[in-house]
Amino acid sequence: MLGVKVAVLGCGHWGKNLVRNFAELGALAAIVEPRRDIAQALSDQYGVPVHTLQEVLDTDDIGGLVIATPAITHADLTKRALLAGKDVFVEKPLALDVADAEEVRALAADNGRVLMVGHLLQYHPAFRKLMTMVSEGDLGRLRYAYSTRLNLGKFRREENILWSFAPHDISMLLTLFGEPPAEVFATGSAFVQTTIADLTTTHITFPGGGRAHIFVSWLHPFKEQKLVVIGDKGMAVFNDGEPWDSKLLVYPHRVNWHDGVPEAVKVNARPIAVEAAEPLRNECEEFIRCISNRAVPRTDGKEGLSVLKILRAAETSMREGQWVTVDKPPKARVEGVMIHESAYVDDPVEILPGTRIWHFSHILSDVRIGQNCVIGQNVVIGPKVTIGDSCKIQNNVSLYQGVTLEDSVFCGPSCVFTNVANPRAHINRKSEFQPTLVKTGATIGANATIVCGTTLGEYSFIAAGAVVAADVPSHALMAGVPARRIGWMSHAGVRLDDTLICPQEGRRYRENGPNQLIEITE
């Protein structure tokens, strides 16, 4: 293993532990960390330089890159490193999108690079012993397993608890059952942040008849990391919260039958001897070994992809409220359109090339979306909504029937469109929907409300939190509740002063009455 040199990208809460281990193994050559104070402190402590990512990719004698950055960046950073000829150890999950994970795995194979995913508990001595016991039949045929991974915090904003905690448990269960799962059913609840689940329960069935479930939460009063395995000859508990001499216990319980009645026969637990060793140290040694010997890691790209498919199925199940087949065919795609795996698109719709639809959004039937639009997270559009070209719709926006956006409209986060003037929950008023038209270039600020039956003029600008209940002139700057005009805005979105000249583009305007602004073109 001598001579292997790696760099660690991301030296935060978890990355600093990777830095420590690779430094102690004599393999750390550099760190990449944008926060200067953290980078300098680690550089001084371990005597290695601070580099940019590009410097690491350009350095031939650094053979491996260890990626411990936010999950949303994993796929892109891994691709860059593989294309630069580096072997990669990326923390879980491998990616947030199955298609990205498949691309990363193929890229590693095509370039002959090591790709390792940070499923830490695969390198825990207690789990390795448990795996051996199951594979050798010490517990008999595996019937059932359940895991709990609970704590208070650390709350994430990029991914929910399922994606943050459950990959470890999914990885272990796949190894123990030794086959891909058949179906997944998951439920989740969000309390701290309304769109990010704080706790989830995932049920998994396997073709051979085995079953498992995973309970994860970062909203729990105490820390618990436990895996219980039930076989027809015995039971085992891997409890990582216990001392080393009792982390792995076997219960040789059995069930006897008397006159057709099952009877439990209980036996005292027996501790299994496990060598005390830091799992992360074992994991780092595995990466160095694989680089040295050009070997396949225990948690390679294939294993990372298998875990990701279960995460995707669980996410889909939470959204749809039903069992999901893990390897069911992917959703139909629209050529030239990026639709995130978690988004749902009904039929029929028309979406033009260049448009991107992000996490957890739902496009209902009879919707038309133009080219080069960006649809953010948790957006609902339709039915029967028309959106022009180059529009940007930020997170948590709903565009209901009757809304039309022309080209280049910006809808800020959580802005609200209504379609009935006087809604009541117990009265059906679908026949009373009123149309709302937002003309080309208009901007609607965060949390603004657009009451139905109104028209927003070209390049108008609605301030954050404003409530618009009447038609808005072109180029008008509207603010307040109810909104009133407080000025004029240029095509570039710059507030005009008394000269009515845009300081950014130099366009000249003049008022043509108290509520009309026109551009001077001569």
Image: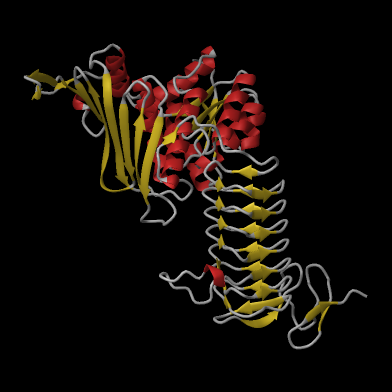
Residue 279 coordinates in the image, percent (x, y):
36, 26
Q: Is residue 451 left or right of residue 190?
A: right
Q: Is residue 199 left or right of residue 196?
A: left
Residue 108 coordinates in the image, percent (x, y):
60, 23
Furthest toward the right, the residue is 522
Please tell me which residue lies in front, 274 or 516. Answer: 516
**Residue beneath the point at 31% across and 30% down:** 212
Q: Is residue 72 left or right of residue 367?
A: left
**Residue beneath the point at 58% across and 34% down:** 100
Q: Is residue 443 left or right of residue 205?
A: right
Query: Is 52 placed above or below 459 here?
Result: above
Please tell me which residue lies in front, 28 or 265. Answer: 265
Query: Is 499 placed above or below 339 here?
Result: below
Please tell me which residue lies in front, 98 or 182. Answer: 182
Query: Is 442 placed above or below 197 here?
Result: below
Furthest toward the left, the residue is 259
Q: Is residue 94 visible?
A: yes
Rendered image quadrant of residue 404? bottom right
Residue 299 coordinates in the image, percent (x, y):
45, 23
Rendered image quadrant of residue 149? top left
